[in-house]
Image (tube, grey):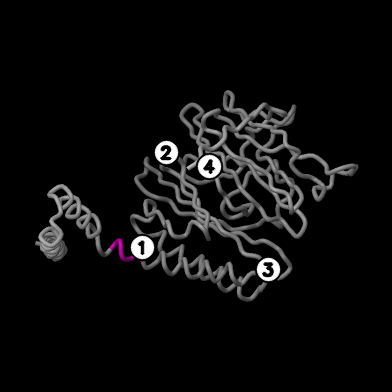
Amino acid sequence: MKPAFFCRLYFFMQSFAVSIVILQMRKIKFITFLSLLIFSQLLIASPETDSTFIAAELEILQTAKQLSASRYDDSQQDSLNSQLRNQFSVILKRDGSFTYPFDTLKNDVSIVTSSDGKVRIITWYSVGDAGNYNYSGFLQYNDKSEKMVRLFELNDCSNKISNLENQTLTPQNWYGVVYYGIVEKKIGNDVIYTLLGWDGAGLYTTRKIIEPLTFTAKGQPRFGKMMIKFARKKMKRMVFEYNKRATMMIQYDAQLDLIVMDHLSVFGDQDTDNPMFLGPDMSYDALIFDNGTWLYQSNIDYRRPPKKKK
C-alpha cells in the first residue's frame, strides 16, 4: 500500500481521538461531533497539495503588499513586480491551481472567474516614479475539450498600441488593465467573455475598458472582437477616459442583463473634448446584448434599488 494511505489513516485516527476528547470535555451533541470529524477530514484531504498552495499564497501576499507600499520607486517596483510574476508563474503551473481561490489576495490582486468555470484572469499594477502605470497578469483557460488548464502570461504593451478600439490583441501584446468584471454570453456554440477593466492611465486621467475575450479552436486567447456597436460604428472594445478625480461606474446588472455605465459630460462651460474635463453627469447609458452584438443605448432609465439596511 502507498505511504500516503498510512499518512491519511494516521491523521484520521489522530483527529478521531481529539474529537472524542472534545466530546467528553464539553458534552457536545453527537451531530456537532460528527461535523467536527468531517471538517477535520476536509482539512487533511490532501495535506501536501494544500500546504504548497497556502505557503505560495502567503509569499505572494507579502510581495504584493511590498509592491503596493513601494509605489513611485522604479527600482523597487521593477524588482518586486518581477518577483511577483515569478511566484505566480510557479504556483499556477501546478495541478489544482485553477480551483485554488487565493482568497487572501483579493485586496492586493484582482482575480475574476467566469461563471462557467472556464476562465480566470489575475491582474495587478505597479506605479513608477513618474506616475506611469504598468500592468501584469496571468490568464488560465480550463480547456475541457483537451482536459487541461492552459496558462498565459500577459505582457503589457500599452505604450505600443494605437487605434485601441479596433485592435485584436494577444497575451504577448496585451493592453494592460486591471480586470474587475467578466460577463459570459453564448453565440451559437461559442462563448464570448466580455471583460470590464480599469486603467490608471496617467497623472490627470483614468480609463475604463469594455473588451470581449474569445478563444481560438486551439485554445488561444484573443482580446477584442468586432461585436460592440456605438451609433453606426462597430468596434472591438470601448474605451472611456475621464478626469482623474472623477469616478465612473461600469458594471453588469445581471437582473436587467445589461452593462450599465455613467454617462460622461464636459464639466461646466468647458468647450473641449479633452478627457481631463470629462466626468459623470448623473445620467446612465448601457450596452444591451442582442443577436451577438453589444448595442449602445444612451440615456436609459436606470434606478438602482436601495440596499437593505443591516
Mark pair 2, 3: CA separation = 37 Å
Total numbered badges shown on the rendered structure: 4
Earlier along the polypeptide chain: callout 1 or callout 4?
1
How far across and down, in percent of the image, does residue 134 sit? 64, 61
Check disc 3 and report the residue beneath it: 128
Tell me the element at label 1.
Answer: helix
Mark pair 2, 4: CA separation = 11 Å
**Amino acid type, callout 2:** Asp
**Amino acid type, callout 4:** Ile
The secondary structure that dominates the magenta segment is helix
Check disc 4 and report the residue beneath it: 182
Res. 5 in view: no
Earlier along the polypeptide chain: callout 2 or callout 4?
2
Task: Specify the segment rendered in magenta.
Answer: 49-54
| Magenta-span inclusion, residue 41 | no
Tell me the element at label 4.
Answer: strand
Disc 1 and disc 4 in contact, CB within 8 angstroms = no
Tell me the element at label 3.
Answer: loop
- Compared to 183, does 54 lie above or below? below
Residue that lies at the very extreme toward the bottom in this rendered image? 75
Mark pair 2, 1: CA separation = 23 Å
Earlier along the polypeptide chain: callout 2 or callout 1?
1
Res. 251 in view: yes
How far across and down, in percent of the image, does residue 24 sit? 10, 60
- Work out whether residue 135 or residue 243 is closer to the camera in this orientation and state it: 243
Check disc 2 and report the residue beneath it: 116
Of the 4 image quadrants, the one containing the N terminus is bottom left
Specify the label residue 53 is tagged with: 1
**Amino acid type, callout 1:** Phe
At 18% from the left and 50% from the top, the residue drawn is 32
How far across and down, in percent of the image, does residue 33 sit? 15, 53
